[in-house]
Image (tube, rainbow, N blue to C red):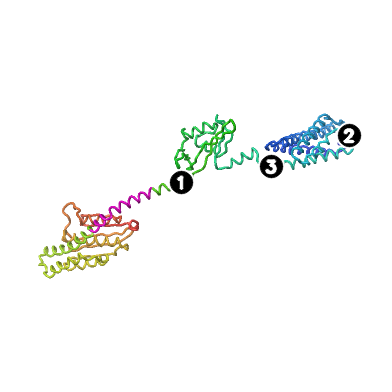
Amino acid sequence: MAEFYRFPHWILTALVMMAAVCIVLQTLTVSYSLRRLHIGWGRRAENGMECAILAALFLFAALLGQVQYGLYGGFLMPSAYGIARQMVFLLTAALGTAAAMGTEQVWLFFVIGGAAVLLPMTEQITGPVYPVFFLTGLVFFLLRSVHICLLRRRELYTQISSVSVKEAIDTLHTGLLFFRRSGDILLCNRQMDGLARQLSGQSLHNGLAFQRLLEGGELHGGCAREILGGQQVFRLPDASVWSISAHAIPMGRRAFVLLTADDVTERWDAVTLLARQNQALEQRGRELRHTIEHLQTICEAEEIARSKGRVHDLLGQRISLLLRALRDGQQPDEALLMDFARSLPTAMREDGTPSPARRLALLRETFQGMDVSVEIRGALPEDREVAESFAEIAVECVTNAVRHGYATRIQFHLFHNDCWRMTVTDNGIPPAGPIREGGGIGGMRRRIARLGGTLDLYTVPRFRIELSVSKEAEGK
């Protein structure tokens, strides 16, 4: 090392920094190498060789440090660490040869050549050119450390190792928990650990205790047990549903337990939706069966109600006209009576029903001959069903007003805003007491209720009927 005393101070400083960088990179190389799976004795020998190279680099740094110390003190120091240099070389040579034979890689023998630079014999033989060999060996180990460090790092991410296996199972959406019969946990991924925290409210420490909790223990707040396809599942506060199964795994004379957690949220949502749809279909089926069973009765009742209404309208109009004539002291025209008698059966047998507007026009014409004024302001609703109901109720209102209130003027006001509305007023005698709703008013109320509307009666200051049908209800 005496030749190094001739070098400028900055060159020695650069060599010391290079040795430091080599030590850092070789330390990373050793770390990456030890984290790989130890497959075979060849890989173990290779890892030992990396440790020996790290020791050799420390000796490189120590020799440079000796020169720096001598220059600082102003005296020349002979080369030291002779025994350590020889021992490190022999260890590196032995492990390098074993690694080359175990891995069948020839380039490992170059490591022996690089370590040979440390031998005192090499320093004596090379003499003045020893710094060149020293610098060459240091550069070789620097480049090799960079190459091996990158190579080992890539192996950790591309080859199977304990770290890569753990990282792989942590990325799974399925939860995994592997433990001994005693409960000692051997392997647990992040998904299962998160599920355990939500179900138990604490970190996972014992696999057997967690399994007993799943089988019948008290779950943490917000979690609940459900049944899906005859199997117990767990519904979490975030609305996700998980199925957790236990599997016994025998290995020789020992037995282990594997818990797997599968996300069945989509299946749970589909089954729940299907159950609701089935329930709705069953309800519709019951209603349909009830309707079919009573279809004939319903048809007969509708026909009877329609016939009764028709008889009520026809007779009510004629009787109202006769009562009007008798109250005014008029002698009923014989021809009119005969026309009433002859046309009644024919009118009752007619199946055709005039349009709502035509019914109102006929109503006005019929009572106009008896000096009863029927005034209609506004237009009927655009909806056919509502218009027919308003026209039928108008006929009933006029008949009742003339027959019971002796009215001579009946007014209808038709308008609409958010609802279809009709107001009926007359100049007849107001009721003396509470109105007893019979077939006429009761029929009007039932008919308007079928449309989702309302019918209100007022007797003060004069008799008035107000009807309203929501346009939304009518559309439905």
Q: Estimate the x, y position of residue 372 in percent, counting from the top left.
A: 18, 65
Give the residue at the far front of this rendering: 252
Residue labelled with disc 2: 124
Amino acid type, label 3: Glu
Left or right, residue 93 beside residue 442: right
Total numbered labels placed on residues in the image? 3
Looking at the image, is mark 3 or mark 2 earlier in the sequence?
2
Does the magenta portion include 411?
no
- Neighbour class for label 1 at 10 Å: few (<14), some, many (≥20)? some
Amino acid type, label 1: Asp
Work out how far the residue at label 1 is from the one at label 2, CA to CA, in angstroms: 83 Å
- Neighbour class for label 2 at 10 Å: few (<14), some, many (≥20)? few
Q: Estimate the x, y position of residue 7 in percent, counting from the top left.
A: 86, 38
Residue labelled with disc 3: 155
- Neighbour class for label 3 at 10 Å: few (<14), some, many (≥20)? some
Residue labelled with disc 1: 269
Residue 54 in the image: above or below residue 340 = above
Magenta-highlighted residues:
279-303
Foreground residue, 361 or 178?
178
Q: Give the overall secondary structure of the magenta segment.
A: helix
Amino acid type, label 2: Gln
In this rendering, the label closer to the viewer, 1 or 2: 1
Q: Secondary structure at mark 2?
A: helix
In this rendering, the label closer to the viewer, 3 or 2: 3
Work out how far the residue at label 3 is from the one at label 1, CA to CA, in angstroms: 43 Å
